[in-house]
Image (cartoon, helix red, strand yellow):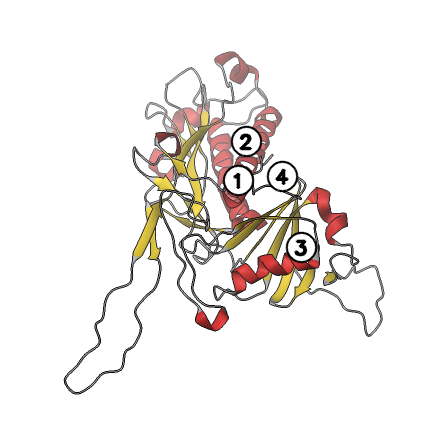
Amino acid sequence: MPQQTLNLKHVSLPSAWDAAELTRLRLADGTTYQQMVADIDGALEIAANMLLNSYYGRLISVTDEVAVEYDSGNVRGFERVTERGRGQGRRGDTSGHMLPLMDFDYNLYWTHLWLRDARRAQIDRQINGLIANVENLFQKEALTRLFKMEEETGHYYGLGSGGVSVPFCDGGGGTIAYTPTPRPERGGTFASTHDHYLRLNGITQANLETAVRHLWEHGIDGPYDLVISLADIASWTNTTNVTGYVEKPDPSVVYGANSELARVDDIYIGGVKTEYGFCRMWASGRIPTTYWGVTKVYGQNDMRNPLKARVPAGQQAISAELIVENVGSYPLQGAIPFIRFGVGVAEMREAAVLVENDSSGDYASPAIS
């Protein structure tokens, strides 16, 4: 088999190793390296698809663009004209920010001695661990950016010396001022001090209504997604405080004809009715207790989703590669899984509202586990 017909997207082998050598060399249990390399490549492809198909994947759209641009502030509208006069006219202001791009690796410690005696089951366990760690990394990066109030700058985030990755509407506390487009039909105009990072006291229906209104007034209609901590489920399902809570039907339970149930996907645990639209409730153990947020997701890889995942130019998904830089006794000796991506806020900086449940003080960004 000629080497080029292997068509591996996620496994990069040294050029000195050809297909014949991959077929000749075997693991201790007889598995050929050619078969193993192809299977690893397939596993990493599955992992890339899993990320987009998960709930975390619903929060993002994937792009290889370096930055995003959007309207900021008032845009002059239509004006009455006369026979000899025309409207003044002017273009609306625009703003923008960069998207981060960072490098991550995961050392497998595949040494000459380990590969010499390795069996397929051992390799499979290592690859399963790799896939789990890719998923873990993506989940943590997505939720960190969702709840993080601070800007990101500098080479550490792949933003160069002057680039900035911004949060959602931050009350004007950052270096890139943003004024949401006016929506007079839903409440009027906004200033650069408009803030979507709130400190509210208690998990209550009234506080949820406050947060949801912050989305609705920008023309974002439901259904919304209420993102909560797994530790706070009991508080959110307590109808004494959250009066609009609606449970999800259980297939093992028979309900009456007048039962009110939430028609939501399996990934949700129920929902809450508000004056501005229905909220589908999703919980994560990665979010610390007392933190929650409201946003709107539009579907897998939809560019209107609140976050963007930046990948290298020409790449279509967040995917890990298995790279071997040096030729050794075995084709995968010293292999290092490598992944390059970053998560930033998308064009709509008003697309999420994040809340800290506390009796005093200001919102402080949580540590996502």
Where 186 sits versus 313, above or below? below
Q: Which mark is residue 130?
A: 2
In which quarter of the view is residue 4 placed?
A: top left
Q: Secondary structure at mark 4?
A: loop
Q: Which mark is residue 286?
A: 4
Q: Position of residue 98 (x, y in %)?
A: 35, 44
Where 139 sits versus 154, above or below? below
Q: Amino acid at mark 3?
A: Tyr
Q: Which residue is mark 1?
A: 144
Q: Amino acid at mark 2?
A: Leu
**Nearer-N-terminus badge (1/3):** 1
Which residue is more in the foreground, 87 or 159? 87
Where 114 sits versus 12, above or below? above
**Nearer-N-terminus badge (4/3):** 3
Looking at the image, which residue is at 35% across and 60% down? 73
Tag nearer the camera, 4 or 3: 4
**Nearer-N-terminus badge (2/4):** 2
Would residue 250 be found to the left or right of residue 37 on screen? right
Hey, which residue is sitting farthest bottom in the picture?
83
Q: Which mark is residue 268?
A: 3
Q: Secondary structure at mark 1?
A: helix
Hey, which residue is sitting farthest left in the picture?
84
Would residue 4 be found to the left or right of residue 10 on screen? left
Quarter holding the C terminus?
Answer: top right
- For label 3, count other residues whose C-alpha is less than 10 Å away and answer few (under 14), some (14-19) or many (20+): some
Quarter holding the N terminus?
Answer: top left
